[in-house]
Image: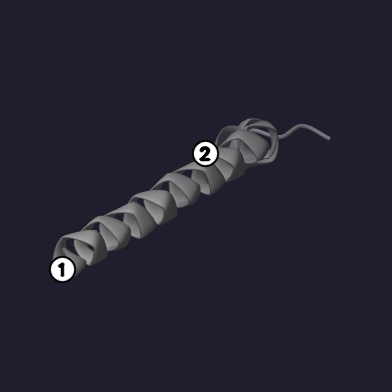
Amino acid sequence: MVTRGIKLYWNVVMASALPAIISGIKQGWSLAWRASILSFQMSFIQTVH
């Protein structure tokens, strides 16, 4: 069975790139979450003192 064009791209390239894409999303979410927590802690410390 020969696959061509968009279907080839989707079945081969996207399938092999999917783990890296998911890993990047997880890392980005983790960084954003830590930045959010850090900013909350910094604002809380400034209001206490």
Point 60% across, 34% down: residue:
20
- For the image, the number of numbered tags is 2
Q: CA distance from mark 2 to mark 1?
A: 35 Å
In the image, 25: left or right of 45? right
Nearer the observer, 10 or 30: 30
Q: Which residue is mark 1?
A: 47
Nearer the observer, 7 or 10: 10
Looking at the image, residue 22 lies above or below residue 12: below
Residue 2 in the image: state x and y as whole percent: 77, 32
Dividing the picture into quarters, in which one does residue 45 lie? bottom left
Amino acid type at mark 2: Gly
Classify 10 Å Cα crowding around label 2: few (below 14), some (14-19), many (20 and above). Answer: few
Q: Which residue is mark 2?
A: 24
Looking at the image, residue 30 lies above or below residue 9: below
Marks 2 and 1, the one that precedes in the sequence: 2
Classify 10 Å Cα crowding around label 1: few (below 14), some (14-19), many (20 and above). Answer: few
Nearer the observer, 27 or 40: 40
Which quadrant would the N terminus be assigned to in this image? top right
Residue 23 in the image: state x and y as whole percent: 60, 40
